[in-house]
Amino acid sequence: MTSTTRRAIAVIALGATLFAASCTAVYRNHGYVPSEEDLALVEVGKSNRDDVTRAVGRPSSAGLLQGAGWYYVGSRWKHFGARAPEEIEREVVAISFDDKGTVTNVERFGLEDGEVVVLSRRVTETSIKGIGLIRQVLGSFGRVSADQILNR
């Protein structure tokens, strides 16, 4: 076998390996959700925040209001080639507290329970319409005098 043939075989083998690797899905897990066994240690009406911390740990996020709940969020994402990652599984455990810090409810939600909620929408209206960047820059030259630049 000649060296050219060996190189061609090596290039083909490398290309086939890269092609096969790019067609394999990669799964990644993000976040933490307590197991049912751990959640069984949390008693509604009896457990407080310290008990929940000992049983399942501190949450990754909490409500903003006083007495609001703790939220444990876990997701599983599928990465496939050059495509955008796709969330294939999501689990949220919400533990609610009253004003005294006692557990009032423990709920579990899945991806199928989710809704798209706009948390914040901030739109700044602009008075500039139909004017490009170059026109804006060139239009500002006549408005600035040398005295303004030199602070005279």
Image (cartoon, grey):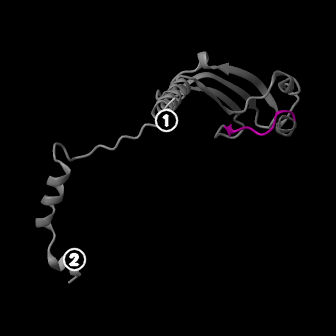
* Left or right position of 69 against 15: right
Quadrant (top left, top right, bottom left, bottom right) of the C terminus: bottom left
Which residue is disc 2 drawn over? 149
Residue 144 in the magenta stretch? The answer is no
Residues at discs 2 and 1 in contact (Cβ within 8 Å):
no
Which residue is disc 1 drawn over? 3
Q: Is residue 132 above or below residue 30?
A: below
Q: Position of residue 15 (x, y in %)?
A: 49, 29
Q: Amino acid at mark 1?
A: Ser
Q: Position of residue 41 (x, y in %)?
A: 89, 27
Q: Position of residue 72 (x, y in %)?
A: 71, 32
Which residue is depicted at the point 86% across and 33% down? Answer: 55
**Label 2 to label 1, Cα distance in Å?**
71 Å
Q: Position of residue 138 (x, y in %)?
A: 13, 59
Q: Amino acid at mark 2?
A: Ile
The quarter holding residue 49 reads top right
- The span picked out in magenta is 55-62
* Left or right position of 54 against 105: right
Residue 57 in the magenta stretch? The answer is yes
SS under mark 1: helix
Q: Nearer the viewer, mark 2 or mark 1?
A: 1
Looking at the image, the residue that sits furthest to the top is 112
